[in-house]
């Protein structure tokens, strides 16, 4: 969290004392070199407060829960694990609402559903739905108002981009792979089907499987989440004339759970490796050569 003020940081205070100890004491005099150093330091501080605002990367992940960050052991997310290890993780954070739209609106405006009256996904036009939000300043607007270039992609608000109130310098949409061939639906054989015979069908979106059909080439680089992440990485690395706020909204792991074959294979291979490792550990150190091979495989996975 960055405290961005138009008049710069407030943590620097200079205090000068004169006639310490009473009138009989001589005045305190600073050497000229110290005064010059202080002046140069103040000039550098002023320049830093104006020009050195950090690049900000904001990631929104739909239905992430806490799984990748010390959560469920079956979740494989080494990049998110590294990101969490490099910063601070709030493991007891709570969502403002269990529904998508009210949670996002509350997060981006700082105004709770109890105050705004935004409780449903159907209230996506939140500025007209709630008088409390008509003139609310979003998180993105705040950075824009303090000199940041504002670029974004993906799912941030439930619908739309809050235009024209949030004045994006650039908001990019992509044509990429979201779903498998419709002829293969449902991939799991049960989505949208009345499996219990009671007249109630499962949600059609409650589906999972590989994006590619058997024998088709891997399409990881063509998927929408991969394209969004690549775009964000390029924005971070390119030079910017002004400080930049990069907002990226990922739609997964929201249902349906469609993944490239490569991702599904990694999950399967990891489970097999872990199974062999656990069995060998129970047997002790008799199969040292095989244990070393398994540890090597673990190292390759972790890398």
Image (cartoon, rainbow, N blue to C red):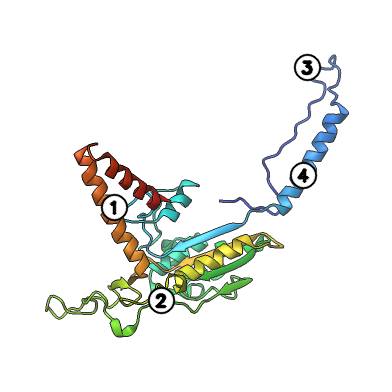
**Mark closest to the chain's N terminus, 1 or 2:** 2
Q: Which residue matches tag 2? A: 178
**Residue occupying image coordinates x 56% and y 74%:** 172
Say which residue label 4 marks: 44
Tell me, yes or no, whether the two marked residues, 3 and 2, touch with CB atoms within 8 Å: no
Query: On screen, 21 above or below 179?
Result: above
Tag 4 and tag 2, C-beta contact below 8 Å: no
**Residue at 78 percent of width and 39 percent of height:** 41
Residue 197 locus on image (x, y percent): 11, 79
The residues bearing labels 4 and 1 have C-alpha atoms spaced at a distance of 54 Å
* Front disc: 1 or 2: 1
Q: Nearer the viewer, mark 4 or mark 2?
A: 2
Label 3 and label 4: CA atoms lie apart by 34 Å
Which dot marks residue 21? Answer: 3
Nearest the viewer among 221 and 95 is 221
- Left or right, 222 with respect to 149, comes to left
User: Which-is-in-front pick, marks 4 and 1?
Assistant: 1
Q: Earlier in the sequence, mark 3 or mark 2?
A: 3
Which SS class for mark 1?
helix
In this figure, which residue is indicated by the disc labeled 1?
A: 273
SS category of the residue bearing label 2: loop
């Amino acid at each position: 969290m960055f405290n961005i003020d138009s008049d710069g940081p407030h943590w620097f205070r200079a205090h000068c004392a004169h006639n310490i100890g009473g009138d009989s004491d001589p005045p305190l005099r600073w050497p000229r070199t110290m005064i010059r150093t202080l002046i140069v330091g103040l000039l550098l501080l002023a320049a830093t407060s104006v020009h050195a605002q950090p690049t900000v990367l904001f990631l929104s992940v739909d239905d992430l829960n806490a799984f990748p960050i010390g959560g469920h052991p079956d979740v494989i997310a080494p990049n998110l694990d590294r990101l969490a290890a490099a910063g601070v993780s709030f493991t007891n954070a709570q969502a403002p609402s269990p529904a998508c739209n009210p949670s996002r609106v509350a997060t981006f405006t700082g105004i709770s559903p109890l105050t705004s009256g935004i409780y449903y996904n159907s209230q996506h036009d939140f500025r007209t739905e709630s008088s409390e939000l008509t003139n609310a300043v979003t998180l993105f607007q705040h950075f824009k108002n303090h000199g940041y270039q504002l670029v974004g992609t993906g799912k941030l608000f439930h619908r739309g981009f809050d235009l024209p109130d949030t004045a994006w310098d650039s908001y990019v949409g992509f044509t990429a792979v979201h779903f498998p061939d419709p002829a293969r639906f449902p991939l799991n054989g049960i989505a949208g089907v009345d499996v219990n015979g009671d007249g109630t069908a499962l949600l059609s979106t409650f589906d999972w499987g590989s994006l590619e059909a058997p024998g088709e080439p891997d399409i990881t680089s063509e998927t929408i989440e991969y394209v969004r992440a690549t775009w964000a990485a390029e924005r971070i690395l390119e030079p910017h004339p002004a400080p930049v706020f990069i907002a990226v909204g990922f739609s997964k792991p929201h249902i349906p759970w469609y993944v490239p074959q490569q991702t599904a294979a990694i999950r399967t291979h990891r489970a097999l490796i872990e199974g062999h490792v656990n069995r060998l550990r129970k047997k002790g150190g008799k199969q040292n050569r095989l244990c070393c091979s398994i540890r090597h495989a673990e190292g390759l996975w972790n890398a």
